[in-house]
């Protein structure tokens, strides 16, 4: 049988053509785009569903929409200026130069992170520049979904009272002045990257920053009305679990995609992620049973999240036994801060962090960063980190210094986000009220959006107390849940 001559379609599959340049690794490119899609699904629909379900019914639409809006806004800001601020050429030791990531000449070329070349003190190259074997378009999109989910996590602190118009202004400002700083400093070739602070997949860049910034924003927005704080039941626990499941399974892309390749390290990261998350969920649930006599479903979701967050900075750097230890600690330390310390510390009670993002992301992220400094295994470190001979404290040598580096890196992220987030909130409040009006806070979605989550009174008919009786959010027969969210 005669060979089929190459035609226009077949050329697209041939090596050495414009569509398949010699540097392209199809397996790496496929995994990177799949990983990006998995992370995107964590947000849309994952956190959209989770947020819309875990809040009181009158805030279901508003909470889901805050997540959806943030995702769309970040995509546009990212490609116009923010990607290069995070992964481009250096402007400052902690910030890259702004610029677009839209042109064909930029996007079809091999992905490069120009500031990531690591040098010895004498000027010799220690580790070459990061140059994954796929186009820049794949890198831009992969990093975009990380930026988007960070803003969505932050939103969890201010659900149920932040003015949606203020949120629309907050998203691009926080992305520009906070997220890009953390991303460049730790991932893009900034000073923490070259100093050797370990953040495999965003324990600091994403979770610590969003937890601290969410807590700061909650302070400036103010608390929910007393009635909502005292009784804030989830409107659909089963849908909440569906959103949580998307979050968990999507984490395979979150941590598995961060070696920028489909390699051995990515496999370790995915396995460790699931080990830690499962352990953490079980520990949190056991603690709920021991102290509150009932296994809280919301508490189990919180434990799952803290496990995912805690393993993130060390997912591909620690061994499986360390992932179990990290899971035990991530299921107990944030549980203790949320369920015990929070109730006894006036400051924490004063600031209304709706979903407890401070505990589940800031505490768990910092905990994971410190534990990574303790448990990072030298051989695994050599597969990923630019600083040679990196190791955790339990492996001796320079490991003790690594823990101090992790603490210092965390302190920078905490300090920057506390200060800059506060400045952003104060600036927005001069133009747009950060907080909804009292009428909106009383009514909910119908007042803010003219829409409600559930047409319970007929074919889209709005609730009318003269016809429909007591509003379902205000029924007294349902006792307040003992789950973690209601305790915040």
Image (spheres, rainbow, N blue to C red):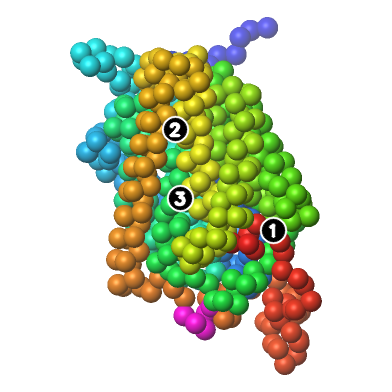
- Rounded to the nearest angstrom, the CA distance separating label 3 from label 2 is 15 Å
Element under disc 2: loop
* Residue 112 visible from this viewpoint: no
Question: At which x and y percent is residue 233?
Answer: 68, 67
Position of residue 308 in the picture relative to residue 182 (left or right): right
Q: Residue at x 28, y 39 (%)?
A: 94
Position of residue 181 in the picture relative to residue 334 (left or right): left
Circle number at residue 343: none
Q: Residue at x 29, y 32 (%)?
A: 191
Position of residue 50 in the picture relative to residue 402 (left or right): right
Q: Residues within 10 Å of mark 2 (few under 14, many from 20)?
A: many
For residue 464, above or below residue 270:
below
Which residue bears the numbered disc 3?
210
Q: Are marks 3 and 2 in contact (CB under 8 Å)?
A: no
Q: Residue at x 72, y 68 (%)?
A: 480
Which residue bears the numbered disc 1?
483
């Amino acid at each position: 049988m005669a060979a089929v001559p190459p035609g226009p379609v077949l050329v697209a599959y041939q090596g050495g053509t414009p569509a398949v340049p010699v540097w392209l690794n199809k397996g790496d490119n496929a995994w990177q785009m799949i990983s990006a899609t998995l992370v995107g699904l964590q947000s849309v629909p994952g956190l959209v569903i989770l947020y819309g379900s875990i809040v009181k019914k009158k805030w279901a639409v508003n909470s889901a929409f805050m997540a959806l809006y943030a995702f769309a806004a970040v995509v546009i800001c990212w490609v116009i200026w923010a990607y290069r601020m995070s992964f481009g050429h250096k402007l400052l030791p902690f910030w890259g130069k702004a610029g677009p990531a839209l042109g064909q000449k930029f996007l079809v070329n091999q992905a490069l992170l120009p500031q990531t070349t690591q040098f010895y003190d004498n000027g010799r190259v220690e580790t070459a520049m990061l140059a994954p074997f796929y186009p820049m378009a794949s890198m831009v999109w992969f990093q975009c979904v990380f930026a988007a989910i960070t803003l969505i996590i932050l939103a969890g602190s201010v659900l149920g009272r932040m003015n949606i118009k203020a949120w629309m202004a907050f998203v691009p400002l926080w992305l520009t002045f906070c997220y890009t700083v953390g991303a460049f400093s730790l991932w893009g070739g900034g000073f923490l990257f070259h100093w050797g602070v370990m953040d495999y997949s965003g324990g600091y860049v994403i979770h610590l920053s969003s937890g601290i910034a969410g807590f700061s924003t909650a302070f400036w927005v103010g608390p929910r009305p007393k009635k909502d704080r005292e009784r804030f039941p989830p409107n659909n626990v089963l849908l909440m679990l569906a959103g949580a499941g998307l979050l968990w399974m999507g984490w395979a892309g979150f941590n598995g995609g961060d070696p920028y390749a489909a390699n051995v390290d990515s496999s370790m990261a995915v396995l460790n992620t699931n080990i830690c998350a499962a352990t953490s969920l079980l520990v949190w649930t056991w603690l709920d049973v021991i102290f509150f006599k009932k296994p809280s479903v919301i508490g189990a979701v919180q434990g799952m999240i803290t496990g995912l967050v805690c393993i993130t900075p060390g997912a591909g750097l620690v061994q499986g036994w360390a992932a179990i230890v990290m899971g035990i600690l991530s299921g107990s330390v944030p549980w203790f801060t949320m369920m015990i310390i929070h109730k006894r510390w006036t400051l924490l009670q004063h600031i209304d962090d709706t979903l407890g993002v401070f505990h589940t992301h800031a505490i768990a992220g910092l905990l994971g960063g410190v534990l990574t400094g303790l448990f990072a295994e030298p051989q695994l470190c050599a597969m990923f980190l630019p600083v040679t001979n990196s190791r955790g404290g339990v492996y001796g040598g320079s490991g003790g210094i690594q823990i101090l580096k992790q603490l210092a890196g965390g302190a920078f992220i905490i300090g920057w986000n506390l200060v800059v987030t506060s400045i952003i909130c104060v600036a927005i409040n001069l133009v747009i009220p950060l907080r909804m009006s009292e009428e909106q806070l009383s009514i909910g979605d119908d007042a803010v959006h003219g829409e409600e989550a559930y047409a319970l009174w007929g074919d889209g008919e709005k609730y009318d107390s003269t016809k429909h009786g007591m509003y379902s959010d205000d029924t007294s027969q349902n006792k307040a849940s003992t789950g973690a969210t209601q305790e915040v």
